[in-house]
Structures are given as structure tokens and as C-alpha cells.
Image (cartoon, helix red, strand yellow):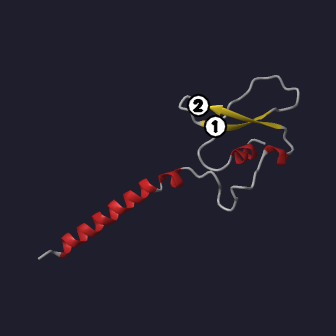
């Protein structure tokens, strides 16, 4: 006869294994969140909405990943150095622009 304690341990073990399997299966959706809640993916937010002149720039990393960036000049005839800022993995680069204005 199987005791209640061993049934409980098997049940808890099964829940832990199922939870770990779900974390592995959905890790991309849990870690990388390209769109904030309430903002649709098709809604393009660019620096132009803030009256900023910008240029779309595409960079390729050493491992072949294509990265999107915006080149925003402080003023049109600016010739100073450029700061390359790498945003974290959640949200949109537009929200970072809002933080620095």
C-alpha cells in the first residue's frame, strides 16, 4: 500500500517538473518582451513623433544577429562624437528616448 506522504511527494515532484518544462517552453516569451502591455506591435513609435530627425540604422553583431538602432543628432549640423547605447531586452527603444529628453 502506498502512503499518503509518498503520493504527496510524487504530486509535488510532478508539479515541479511540469513547471520547469513550461519555463523552458515559454522562456523566449517570458524573458524578451518587445512590446509593452497595451501597445500593439503594429503601432510604430519613432523619434519623429517627438519632432526629432533620425536615421534608421541596422547593425550586424559578430554572431550574425541583426540589430536595429536609431541615429539621432543633437542638432542638424552636429559633428561631435556619437554615443552608442544598448537598450535592455524589454519594451521599445522609443521609451528609452523619452527618458533622455
Q: Residue at x 88, y 26 (%)?
A: 77
Label 1 secondary element: strand
Q: Considering only vertical position in the picture, is 59 above or below 40? A: above
Q: Position of residue 18 (x, y in %)?
A: 36, 62
Circles 1 and 2: CB atoms closer than 8 Å: yes
Q: Quadrant of residue 85?
A: top right
Label 2 secondary element: loop
Q: In the figure, is residue 61 to the left or right of 45?
A: left
Q: Considering only vertical position in the picture, is 66 above or below 15? A: above
Which residue is situated farthest in the left direction here?
1
**Residue located beneath label 2 in the image:** 61
Q: In the figure, is residue 26 to the left or right of 6?
A: right
Q: Are there few (<14), some (14-19), or many (20+) residues within 10 Å of tag 1? A: few
Q: Quadrant of residue 25?
A: bottom left
Q: How many marks?
A: 2
Q: Which quarter shows the C terminus?
A: top right
Q: Position of residue 42 (x, y in %)?
A: 72, 55
Separation (CA) of disc 1 from disc 2: 7 Å
Q: Position of residue 50 (x, y in %)?
A: 84, 46
Mark before the other along the chain sequence, 1 or 2: 2
Q: In the figure, is residue 1 to the left or right of 54?
A: left
Q: Position of residue 3 (x, y in %)?
A: 15, 75
Q: Considering only vertical position in the picture, is 79 above or below 73? A: above
Q: Residue at x 56, y 33 (%)?
A: 64
Along the line of sight, the residue nearer the viewer: 71 or 101:
71
Q: Quadrant of residue 61?
A: top right
Q: Residue at x 65, y 60 (%)?
A: 37
**Residue located beneath label 1 in the image:** 67
Amino acid at each position: 500500500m502506498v502512503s499518503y506522504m509518498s503520493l504527496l511527494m510524487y504530486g509535488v515532484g510532478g508539479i515541479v517538473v511540469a513547471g520547469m518544462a513550461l519555463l523552458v517552453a515559454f522562456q523566449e516569451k517570458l524573458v524578451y518582451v518587445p512590446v509593452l502591455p497595451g501597445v500593439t506591435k503594429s503601432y510604430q513609435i519613432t523619434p519623429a513623433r517627438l519632432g526629432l530627425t533620425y536615421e534608421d540604422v541596422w547593425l550586424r553583431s559578430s554572431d550574425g544577429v541583426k540589430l536595429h538602432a536609431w541615429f539621432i543628432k543633437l542638432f542638424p549640423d552636429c559633428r561631435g562624437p556619437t554615443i552608442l547605447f544598448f537598450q535592455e531586452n524589454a519594451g521599445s527603444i522609443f521609451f528609452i528616448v523619452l527618458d533622455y529628453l
